[in-house]
Every structure is written in C-alpha cells, then in structure tokens.
Amino acid sequence: MSKGNINVSVENIFPLIKKFLYSDHEIFLRELISNATDATTKLKHLISIGEAKVELGDAKIEINIDKDAKTLTIKDQGLGMTAEEVEKYINQIAFSGAEEFLEKYKDDKNETGVIGHFGLGFYSAFMVADKVEIITKSFKGDKAAHWTCDGSPEYTLVEHDKEGRGTEIILHIAEDSTEFLEDGKISGLLTKYNRFNQVPIKFGTKEETLPLPEGAAEDVTPEKVTVDNIINNTNPAWTKKPADLEDEDYTNFYRELYPMQFEESLFHIHLNVDYPFNLTGILYFPKLSQNMDMQKDRIQLYQNQVFVTDNVEGIVPDFLQMLKGVIDSPDIPLNVSRSYLQADGAVKKISGYITKKVADKLSSLFKNNREDFEAKWNDIKVIIEYGMLSEEKFFDKAKKFALYPTVDDTYFTFDELLEKTKDAQTDKDGNHIVLYAANKDAQHGYIQDAKEKGYEILLLDSPIVSHLMQKLETSNDKVKFTRVDADHIDNLIKKDDTVISKLSDEEKETLKPMIEASVPKETYTVQLEAMDSNASPFLITVPEFMRRMKEMNATGGGMMGMGNLPEMYNLVVNTNHELVGEILNTKTEKKRNRLINQAFDLAKLSQNLLHGEELTNFIKRSYDLIK
Ligand SMILES: Nc1ncnc2c1ncn2[C@@H]1O[C@H](COP(=O)(O)OP(=O)(O)OP(=O)(O)O)[C@@H](O)[C@H]1O
C-alpha cells in the first residue's frame, strides 16, 4: 500500500474545482467517458500495430448507478493503467492540469462557462463526488491498482484483485449532487453528449422482442430477451464516405439527429476535409417556415463524435446558422469557453471553409438541375441573400446562381435578367431599371400597367431584399431597382417621347391648389403629370428611395433615423384624363370636391390605404353617386 499527498499548492483544491465549474457540473460525465473512449481506441490501435497481444473483444463502456451505495461507475475495457501509471498520469500529470486551471481562474469572478482549455479531465469527477476510486488493470498484465481519494490532497494506492482488463471509475456522489444518481438524468446526459460516441456505451438493459420464425403459427407469442441497452450509434452517417451513402441514408440521419423535427430537409452538404485542418460533417438546408424556432434543432458541434455545443456562433458564419446538421473536428478544443473557441485558429478557418463548401454545393445544384433549384428557391433564398450581404466571398460565388423570380414565375439569374431587359428597360439617361413588386395582390394595378409596356417585373418579397438591392446597385453601375408603385408608369422608366398635356400651364396652376386643398398635405405631395388619357386620373406612389430606406431600417441598417420618417406619398394627377378636365371645369365647389374626394379615395383604395372612417364615407358617397 502506498499513501501520499498529491503535490498541491492550494490547501484544498477540490471545493475550488466545484466552485469554479459551478454552471457546468454535468460535463464530468463527458470527460470520464472521453477518457474511457480514448483508453479503448488506444488499445485497439496498439493491437492493430501488434504492440498489444490481447483480444479487444466486445469492448464497451458501461455506466452503472448504485442508488444504495450512492455511486456512479464508469467502466471500460481499454488499456488500463499499472500502479506506476496511476502515479504518473493521475497524481502528477492530470493533477497539474487541474491545478493550472485553478491558478488561471482563481480570481475570475465570472463563474459561467469558465472551463479553460486545460482539460480538467479526470478531476472534474470531484465536481459531483466527494470520494473517487479508480480500479484499473493494465493490458500489460500487472496486478490491478486501486486508487482512492476523498477530496483532500491525500490519496491511497493499493493492489486490487480485479481480473478483467480496463478501468473502473467509481464516483461516490456528494450530497448536493444526488441528481446524478437518477436514471433519467444520466440517460439525458448520455444522449446529449455521447449518442454518437465511438465506443458502444451500455446503460442498463432493455427487453427486445425476437422476430417470429418464418411460418410460425399466428397465435405464437414472440419470445422476449433482455439485451444491453446501448445508447449510442458508433457509426453516424457523417463518419462514412459520401460514396457509401444513398440519399435515404442522409434523410434517415436527419431524422436521427432531430427526432422531433417533422419537416424534411431540402438538401445536404457532406463536409470532408483533412487539410489544413480535419473536419467532417453533414449540413442540411431546412425548409424555412415563418414560425420556425431558430433556437431549436441547431447545428451541433462534435469533437471526435463527442458533443461540444450547439451554439456555433463564431464557428459557422452567421448566415449559415439557419442550417442544421453536424460538424465534427478533432481540432476543436473540447473544454473551452466560448470566447476561447472563437479565437482559436482552427475554428476560424472552419468558418471560411464551410462558406466555400456551401457556395460550391449550391452552384452545382444550380448547374446540374436548375429546375429543382428553382423549385427550392423560395425556401433557401433568405439564407442565400443573407450570405450575399454578409460575406463578400459568398457574394462573388452566389452572383452566378442567385435567382430573381418574376411575378409570372420565370427565374432569372441577375445576368440573364439584365440581358433580357436591357433594351426595353433602359431609360433616356442610360439607367437600366429593374422593376419589382413586393406583393402581387397589393400592387396588382401597377404590375398590369408595367406588363402592358412589355416590362419584366420581379417578385422580391424576402425581408432583407432591400439591402440586397442596395448592394447590387452599388456593384452594378447604372442599374437601379424601382418598385412598380414608385411612380406612374411613364416615369418609372423615362423615355424621350413626352406625352403632350391637354391642359395649359395656366389651367394647371388653377388645378393644383384645388386638389391640394382636399388632400392632407403633410402626407401627400400633389404632382401633375401628362399621361396617357386611358391611365388612371389619380395615382398614389411611394418614392423608391424613401420606402427602401424605411425597409432597410426595419431590418437593421439603412440610413440612421430614416425608419422614423412618417409615411409620405405622391399623388400623381393625370392631366390628360377626362375626369381631371371635369374637376377643373366644374362650376360648383361642392361637386368639384366630391369628384376629387372620390378619385382620391379610389387611388387610396388601390394602394390599400383606405380604412376606417374614410372607408365608410367612401362607401356612402359611392352609393349616393349611383342613386
Ligand atoms: N479510463 C482510463 N483508462 C486509462 N487511462 C486513463 C483513464 N482515464 C484517465 N487515464 C489516464 O489519465 C490521464 C489523465 O487524464 P485526464 O482526463 O485528466 O487528462 P487527459 O485525458 O490526458 O486530457 P484531457 O481530459 O484534457 O483531454 C490520461 O491521459 C490517461 O493516461
């Protein structure tokens, strides 16, 4: 028997471990299972290179709870340790890691998530246990060793009669941590951290019904057997080669990953890189729905099949955080705080790599099956548009496959659109005007007018599209986006052929104040225009610049303060329309006002701006007019 003091400078280190890791107590289990997994895979390696002359057998990790003894045991059949190795790895090396950790965080007042990058590893057991035992037998065949430590710097190390190879870590769970003696708690943790662990993990047993032998009579009761309850899938899809997987395997894995997600994914991207860093994974483009909970079913980050976090901020570019799936990299440090993770060099490179892979995949989908890509566009556009706005490199690639659908469901790339519209939609100053609508119903009349002119009208309705237009205008000189209701049709794309006004300048000067007197001038600017006599007499338009700035403000960005501007409209009066002539020539003021109000209300109605009392009055007046 040997007794000793762990070389310690802090008087009682274990209460400190507890205190510092307060918010993350549960990770002790992941740490100990990682050690057990390492011990098993290392042994496998030694066997494969002929250095260990033993059989690996059905090496699994077993987790056992003994409620009476108040212990939780983690048992592996890995390489085990000799007494000297316990002395070296547990008393010296592992401990110095723990000590270094505490040294660093001694004065840290912020207790949340301060797990350092020092692999607190084995000693994290003391976060939940007041006594820990190690019973371990090395594959080399020495006698088994039994190490015990009750949380003081003292430990004992004696021989043990353990027969089988491997290590058992017995945690005597402390009074304040008895939740870790609950089956439900442990099984929850195993699912969270270890459901794709490389080595099978057994937690209790379960009953399984054997299939009936072929040709068995119908009234035969199937036989039931008790089998190990293995909680993990040791070979998840992302660890396999893409060539070995069918579409169905990807779909099944999506379901396995998110059992509560009933929507299928749209497509997947299998990541696989070994230089300059190691990374595998599968990302899925989900079907985005309006009420999707972004916090649910997020991308999960793994290190060698051990769950690290599902908060991938700073690791995966912002615009791709709406994706789902798994990223696994041995280069991702396991025990680190968020800020440390984000500052890590390997992690930074991952972000750029993922962006590139996603862009390449989208590009190949677009090239190989454009029809399918168009069909999915509505579901993926927000992610792509967001990416184009936030990552310049992604913008450069996405330019070639980002789509611009028209109100008639034709999908153009930006270059195709410019090519198609350059003749009809270039104005007299050489500006190439891209017309769009945000809502087919609300802007129906304006869309019709533009269609009659032979223009193409895009349907751009995603929430951040105003920012994208701004960016496209900046990067394409002379291209201007204009919404169909930004002005009357002849002004949207100004050509040289001016329409002659039927009204003289004097008549116009008389008319303008008449109309201005009847409309609220804080909101409406009256603008007289000589238009086609068949066009509407009154038309309400929203200047493009104003509206876009307001929209951009609403979704973040745009010019400061523009979001608070009141609604402002133009009231375009068609001086060539018969009704406008009548307004001018009507003798009685009462009749004139009635005509103006009626025409103004109709114009408002077509922009969905007539509500409440105004609408009631309009309906009443309309009935009076047809009486
Ligand atoms: N189950 C085990 N079987 C065999 N050896 C073990 C086992 N658990 C721990 N050890 C030994 O003890 C050492 C210290 O373990 P500890 O968890 O503190 O650190 P680590 O695993 O080396 O690093 P980290 O946990 O930071 O990744 C290990 O390197 C290993 O040599």
Image: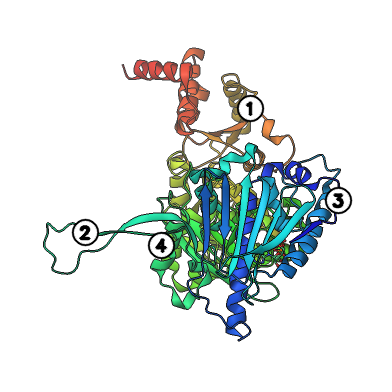
- Tell me the distance, in whole angstroms, between the alpha carbons under discs 3 and 1: 84 Å
Question: What is the secondary structure assignment of the residue under circle 2?
Answer: loop
Contact between marks 1 and 4 (CB within 8 A): the answer is no
Q: Amino acid at mark 3?
A: Glu
Query: What separation in Å lies between label 2 and label 3 (alpha carbons)?
Result: 61 Å
**Where's residue 422, x and y in %?**
56, 63
Q: Amino acid at mark 2?
A: Pro
Q: Position of residue 497 (x, y in %)?
A: 57, 52
Residue in the foreground of this view, choosing between 416 and 127: 127
Q: Image quadrant of residue 214?
A: bottom left
Name the disc covering residue 222, or none: 2
Residue 438 visible in the shown view? yes
Q: Which residue is mark 3?
A: 103
Residue at 50 percent of width and 53 percent of height? 458
User: Distance between the Cα atoms at labels 2 and 4?
Assistant: 28 Å
Q: Secondary structure at mark 1?
A: helix
